[in-house]
């Protein structure tokens, strides 16, 4: 019976983790917001231990931070943090892509082409949205494309390590000034060029394009209204 309860608790903790993570990624909970255990317990109808387990997991992925006496809060946005995050992402993403190209097979190539096609056919903004905010559908397709590029690396550990930095970068992108990451850029061409180089097995060009793509997004975000109003 104890094992059943433990399994049920772990399953519920995973569900709570996924719900909170979804709220953070969809910008329903803003950066820096406190995540109070009491209200979360009431919202999900679970015990304190279940909520703490979920928040601890989010903390390990650097979407949430834990501070003594203050508890948990969503990771705040700051320029230094974004620059540091970018450097880490470049190293992880280019390493994964280089390994993927070295181990490339037809299945990986097909997944990259399919993900690029889906991304290109997905509207960046919701129909009728006058603010030009990035849609969840496009964000999902964008995530799927970059995940497809890395997925051929053959390393579950590397794939796990890349998820946290990618998600953290996504929060910056979602909270930036509407349209910021698309301003004066042909992002779909950038994605297409990366995919073409990867499929051609040109690791040097593919990783160089991927690094430029990531760093250009950071450069644009650093000049956005959001970051200009964020303390250093």
Image (cartoon, helix red, strand yellow):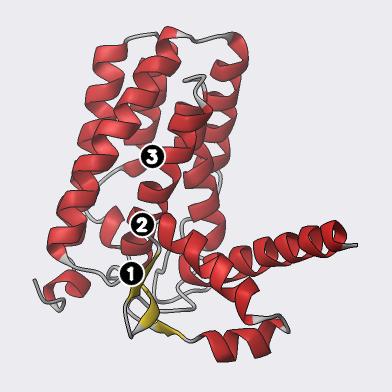
Task: Name the secondary structure under disc 3.
Answer: helix
Q: Residue 46 or 229: which is nearer the viewer?
A: 46
Which-is-in-front pick, marks 1 and 3?
1
Badges 2 and 3: C-beta atoms under 8 Å apart?
Answer: no
Mark 1 vs mark 3, CA separation in Å: 29 Å
Mark 2 vs mark 3, CA separation in Å: 22 Å
Mark identifier at residue 40: none
Residue named by callout 1: 75
Residue named by callout 3: 188
Q: Quadrant of residue 131?
A: bottom left
Q: Residue at x 31, y 13 (%)?
A: 203
46 lies above or below 66: below
Q: Residue at x 48, y 9 (%)?
A: 103
Image position, residue 122 (x, y; %): 55, 49
Q: Residue at x 33, y 69 (%)?
A: 75
In this view of the protein, can residue 58 be seen by the observer?
yes
Residue named by callout 2: 168
Which-is-in-front pick, marks 2 and 3?
2
Farthest residue, direction right: 1
Estimate how packed mark 3 is, as few (under 14), some (14 to 19) or many (20 or more) residues with alpha carbons within 10 Å: few
Q: Residue at x 26, y 62 (%)?
A: 180
> Dividing the image into 4 quarters, which one contains the C terminus?
bottom left
């Amino acid at each position: 019976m104890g094992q059943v309860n433990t399994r049920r608790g772990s399953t519920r903790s995973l569900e709570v983790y996924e719900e909170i993570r979804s709220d953070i990624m969809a910008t329903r909970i803003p950066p820096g917001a406190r995540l109070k255990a009491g209200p979360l317990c009431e919202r999900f109808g679970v015990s304190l231990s279940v909520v703490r387990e979920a928040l601890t997991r989010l903390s390990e992925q650097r979407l949430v931070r834990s501070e003594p006496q203050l508890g948990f809060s969503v990771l705040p946005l700051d320029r230094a943090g974004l620059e540091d995050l970018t450097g880490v992402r470049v190293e992880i993403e280019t390493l994964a892509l280089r390994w993927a190209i070295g181990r490339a097979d037809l299945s990986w190539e097909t997944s990259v082409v399919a993900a690029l096609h889906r991304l290109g056919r997905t509207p960046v903004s919701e129909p009728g949205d006058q603010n030009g905010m990035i849609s969840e559908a496009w964000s999902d397709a964008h995530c799927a494309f970059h995940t497809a590029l890395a997925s051929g690396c053959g390393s579950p550990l590397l794939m796990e390590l890349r998820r946290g930095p990618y998600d953290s970068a996504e929060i910056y992108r979602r909270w930036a000034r509407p349209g910021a990451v698309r301003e004066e850029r042909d992002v779909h061409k950038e994605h297409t060029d990366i995919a073409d180089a990867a499929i051609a097995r040109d690791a040097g060009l593919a990783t160089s394009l991927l690094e430029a793509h990531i760093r250009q997004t950071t450069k644009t975000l650093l000049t956005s209204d959001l970051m200009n109003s964020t303390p250093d």
